[in-house]
Amino acid sequence: MPPKEFLVQTADGMTWHVEQSGSGSAPHIILIPSGEGDCQSFRKITALLSPSFTVTTFDMPGFSRSVPAPHAFDNMGPYVVANQIIGLMDKLEIASATIFGSSSGGIFATALLQEHEKRVERIIVHEIPMTVLKNLKDWAAWPESENPKIVQNCRGLFLDGMNEDKEAWLGLGEEYHKRLEKNFTVWIRNYSPCVDEMRWNREELKRLKAKINWTLGGQMPMARFFSNVVLATEVGIPIKVLDCKHFPHVSIPKVLAEHVRECCK
């Protein structure tokens, strides 16, 4: 059964495209999109998790079918986004939830745990960027006239750099990939700089580590996210390796669904 799709307006003026499935009485899990910003990439894992969970996901503000409030991108940062997601949880009457996120979705999941611990049962994160890549900073500084080039660069980055199963990525559909043309510039210019505003306080993470489940992709070059290994080791969080690159929910949804169920036992 496809998820229920609807729009939700929150008190901060955001209009969110939300997709929800499951019984409503089962434990809540929230799936946060990454730089693509569009929740359609979660369709396969949503179907796998909905028999056991109430699954909620959404397009990020300013992406695809979600409309940001005026000035929503002013003073943008991971904790601002975390507060926006809490506003949506309030509107949906979700008292607490497990949070999944890959890449920047993992950043926002971590920010939610840091700022709103009582609302977060646990986080399940995959390959969190800990610094903004130089080429992304360069692209963000380009004039608006270069937006088509940003889109072209991001298409290649996502297809070749982030997905080992190109057929699964392209199989998300023509409409989905058409929406990404706008999303890529929103991500580069407004969301990617958030990475550098995260606080990676070791003592805080040690206190929260029982709620943190962390994975890396075994098919990703080691150097890309080696900082995750260093930090997790320093604070005592075990890291599990999944046989994928950056988006396990796209390429290995059955494996990821089993991992989620294991984390939630």
Image (cartoon, grey):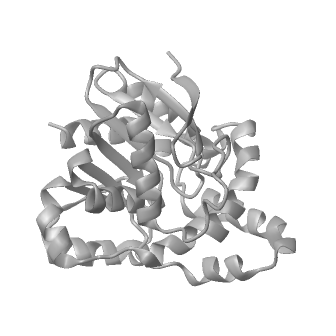
| In-front residue for pair 119/242 | 119
Name the residue located 83 percent from the left edge and 73 percent from the top edge. 146
Percent position of residue 10, x then y: 52, 41
Quarter of the figure with the C terminus: top left
Q: How many numbered marks appear?
A: 0
Percent position of residue 164, x then y: 52, 54
Asked if residue 209 lies left or right of residue 116, the reply is left
- Dividing the picture into quadrants, the one containing residue 114 is bottom left
| In-front residue for pair 108/173 | 108
Name the residue located 49 percent from the left edge and 15 percent from the top edge. 1
The answer to whether residue 252 shows anywhere in this view is: no
Question: Is 88 rendered above or below residue 46?
Answer: below
Q: Residue furthest front?
A: 11
Name the residue located 67 percent from the left edge and 61 percent from the top edge. 186
Percent position of residue 7, x then y: 59, 31
- Dividing the picture into quadrants, the one containing residue 105 is bottom left
Asked if residue 261 lies left or right of residue 74, the reply is left
| In-front residue for pair 64/244 | 64
Percent position of residue 111, x then y: 35, 62
- Dividing the picture into quadrants, the one containing residue 189 is bottom right
The answer to whether residue 99 shows anywhere in this view is: yes
Asked if residue 94 lies left or right of residue 118, the reply is right
Asked if residue 73 lies left or right of residue 226, the reply is right
